Amino acid sequence: MKAVAVIGNPKPASRTRDAAERLAAALGLDCEVLEVAELGAGLLDRDAPHVTAAVQRVQAADVVIAASPTYKGTYTGLLKLFLDRFPTATGLAGQVAVPLMLGAGPAHALAPELTLKPVLVELGATCPAQGLYQLDSTYTSDSALARFTGQWGRTILSAATLRTER
């Protein structure tokens, strides 16, 4: 099963990336990482071949972990620029997506559900689980990831297995 973690943090090698890699490992997925920040100004060029190739890499995955820090209650504009490259309703058609967001406090705990998950579904992805929100100060030591994978891991993997069997 192929997974890609799309990291929407403007800083490469961020806590967001680490959290996404931890989620993939907890789900038992071999995961390629796509740092959107590394695509640079090509995100603004509709014909940039390296961005088109990045979109195709994501579209070839069975599981997409869309990861972002929480900025003003939502995902980053950087991630939005990348997601805008996917056609509505078909860009992630048939793929399983997991929204993941890190934030400074519990006030934005619903951000993955209310902001990131709807755009993934709009692009055609199946989101069989609730989004995962973790505090950026404790994501390495708290039990949020274990609780999430205990509750949703089997559902996510089952949905992805159905995709690979088609």
Image (cartoon, rainbow, N blue to C red):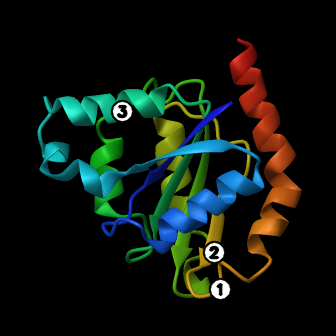
Task: Tell me the number on the disc at residue 134.
Answer: 2
Residue with the mark numbered 3: 55
Residue 103 appears left or right of 150: left
Kind of residue indicated by mark 1 = Thr
Taking 76 as reference, is 121 above or below it? above
| Residue occupying image coordinates x 52% and y 30% | 124
Task: Tell me the number on the disc at residue 138.
Answer: 1
Q: Are marks 1 and 2 in contact (CB under 8 Å)?
A: yes
| Residue occupying image coordinates x 35% and y 54% | 79
Q: Find numbered disc 2 in the image and state the secondary structure of the residue it sits on.
A: strand
Kind of residue indicated by mark 2 = Gln
Label 3 Cα neighbours within 10 Å, binned few <14 / some 14-19 / many ≥20: some
User: Upstream in the sequence, badge 1 or badge 3?
Assistant: 3
Distance from disc 3 to disc 2, alpha carbons, whole Å, reads 26 Å
The answer to which image quadrant residue 149 occupies is bottom right
Residue 89 appears left or right of 109: left
Residue 46 appears left or right of 143: left
| Residue 75 x/y as whole percent | 42, 64
| Residue 34 x/y as whole percent | 41, 47
Visible in this render: residue 77? yes
Distance from disc 1 to disc 3, alpha carbons, whole Å, reads 31 Å
Closer to the camera, 111 or 164?
164
Q: Find numbered disc 3 in the image and state the secondary structure of the residue it sits on.
A: helix
Q: Nearer the viewer, mark 1 or mark 2?
A: 1
